[in-house]
Image (cartoon, helix red, strand yellow):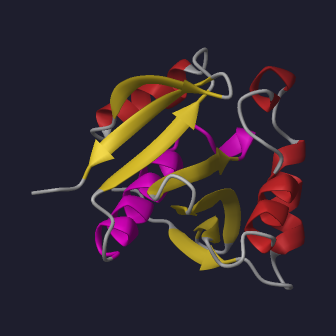
Amino acid sequence: MVEITLREVTRDNWRPLVLLSRALPQDQQRYVAHNAISMLDAHYSDGAYTQFGVYAGEQPVGYVLYGHDNDSAQWWIIRVMIAHGEQGKGYGRAAMQQVIERLRATPGCDAIYISFVPENQAARALYSSLGFEDTGEVEDGEAVYRLALTP
């Protein structure tokens, strides 16, 4: 299993995490919002969203954002981003597994939702392999998947 840690985004580490988005190739930039936008989403969510840097040792390799959508009363993994040079090393799967376990331990969270650009086959394969299932819904042009957490 790949070893990563999720670390709180702070005034000391936010810049390197933002810069990870700049290295994404043009064809991947349409799949995920820039980390700076995600950090603003977290900042202005009134505490509804949680954000972490994904680290391999001391090296930042990605970013995740998740939280509770008060309008729908659903829990969402909102953003998962792994830097271009770090993709294919299992960091995305490891980060997803840690976020899923955090949400599984959250009272009242019985399902997790995630959405992605339908053309992003890597995301589709990863999320499906983790047990997420297609809901058949489309939100803002993105396919919506759901992971049931009930026993």
Q: Residue at x 37, y 57 (%)?
A: 97
In the picture provided, is 3 more to the left or to the right than 140? left
Tell me if residue 62 is in the magenta stretch.
no
Decide if residue 88 is in sight here. Answer: no
In the picture provided, is 38 more to the left or to the right than 5? right
Q: Residue at x 33, y 37 (%)?
A: 132
Magenta part, dominant SS: helix
Residue 22 image position (x, y, % from top left)? 90, 44
Q: On screen, 98 above or below 79?
A: below
In the picture provided, is 4 more to the left or to the right than 98? right
Tag count: 0
Q: Which residues are magenta?
A: 83-106
Q: Residue at x 67, y 57 (%)?
A: 61
Quarter of the image where one finds residue 129: top left
Q: Quadrant of the N terminus?
A: bottom left
Quarter of the image where one finds residue 105: bottom left
Residue 91 image position (x, y, % from top left)? 51, 51
Residue 147 image position (x, y, % from top left)? 31, 44
Q: On screen, 118 above or below 97?
A: above
Q: On screen, 31 above or below 80?
A: above
Q: Quadrant of the C terminus?
A: bottom left
Q: On screen, 101 above or below 90?
A: below
